[in-house]
Image (spheres, rainbow, N blue to C red):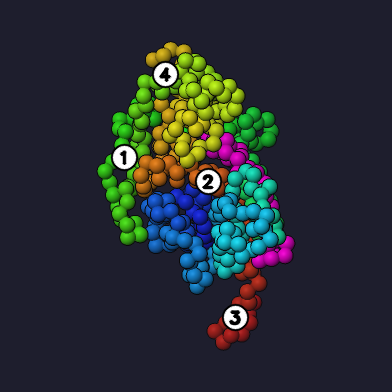
Amino acid sequence: MTKPTMIDLFAGCGGMTVGFAHEGFEPIMAVEWDKSAAATYAANFGESHVYAGDIAEVSDDDIPSADVIIGGPPCQGFSNLGLKRLDDPRNQLWREYMRFITKARPKVFVIENVDRFSKSPEFQMLLAEVNHGLLQEYEISYGVLNAADYGVSQRRRRTIVIGSRIGLIKLPQPTHDKNPQPGTGLLRWRTVRDAIYGLPERPGSTELPEVSTEYFGERMQGPFTGLDIHFRRDPRPLSLARYDAVPPGGGRFNIPEELLPRCWREKPTGTTDVMGRMRWDAPSLTIRTEFFKPEKGAYLHPQWEPTESRRVNRVITHYEASLIQDFPKDYRWVGTKVAIAKQIGNAVPAGLAGAIARHIRPAIEAAAEARLSTVPVVDSDDRLIA
């Protein structure tokens, strides 16, 4: 068959599309309301098939047929009341996702969301639509997958739902493991070292280059690529002293009391990974949208040795975060520093998306071959010959 086609909804900067395109899927439509994220997507996959706006404003006539729909409708605005009233405006984004499925009639749809999604009211609504609603044609499988189990240098747990009207498609089996046993065929987890080792320890700039391009009729910063987004921050001496006290795998509890802010001194328990330092030889913890703030998680650079001269006391850069999120080294980014960080942190790691794409493609191809084998062949006089 020709390349299977796909629509990416709530596409962000294109993390899922990276994985699917790498496995031979052709993106024919993407919808993203955030202009900077949509521009990043367009910078990498082309602007012509991108709708940068409200998904509700895409008309039914503009929704193409596709083999697959992928995306992660935001988990916002639902309540038990929303479950009882499907016309509740807070259900709008999920209704739009389902509208696309009913119009495009994909063979398969893939939803990714937060790890607690399967316990949410949104998920119960999805089940109701599968059981006796708009999605009755589809069988679903679902579960929480860890990106590290699929070759990503990051422990990131996400709920994945695969809906199929060409036969049940189970979730893909892991390809990697923390401690793979002989004979399983599993590879060892990829590490932070695999993703970012060898990059300049002290980036040369604190700013993005002065570049701008027009996307969707609006001039925006970028695109930037590679070391363009490998810029540093200039923390205060007190912050540097705090960083210096944190070894790999450590966090705020390693910081001497006299260096702690009052809020931490008065709260000796609680979150353990803030002001944390990564380990070279393990996957990172989840990269979130404010990875450039060490007080938000374990985002300090992993290089730290007892010898003080061999310590890198800074947070990871945007470029390092993008590589840990499994974006290609030459990916192109559009927007401000904060906008690009948000795009990186919100993305689906390409390796996880690629594993799903690789898993579902044989079923899509088999369904296409089965359909073709049942199409009658006629000669020029419309006589059946096969």
Give the residue number, with chain letter if any, for mark 4: 241
The answer to whether residue 68 is visible is no
4 or 3: tag closer to the N-terminus: 4
User: At label 1, which amino acid type do we have?
Assistant: Leu
Residue 234 lies left or right of residue 148; in this view the side is left
Which image quadrant for residue 322? Answer: top left
Residue identified by numbered label 1:
208
Q: Amino acid at mark 3?
A: Val
Disc 1 versus disc 4: nearer the observer: 4
Q: Between label 2 and label 1, give the one nearer the viewer.
A: 1
Give the magenta-colored segment's residue range.
129-158
Q: Residues within 10 Å of mark 1 (few under 14, many from 20)?
A: some
Report whether residue 336 is seen. yes
Tell me how far mark 2 sits from mark 4, CA to CA: 34 Å
Disc 3 secondary structure class = loop
Query: Which part of the image, by quadrant, shows the N terminus?
Result: bottom right
Q: Residue furthest left?
A: 210
Circle 2 — which element? Answer: loop
Q: Quadrant of the C terminus?
A: bottom right
Which is closer to the viewer, label 2 or label 4? 4
**Mark 4 residue type:** Ala
Name the secondary structure under disc 1: loop
Residue bearing mark 2: 348
Pick whichever, 141 or 179, lies toward us. 141
Compute the Cα span from label 2 to label 3: 46 Å
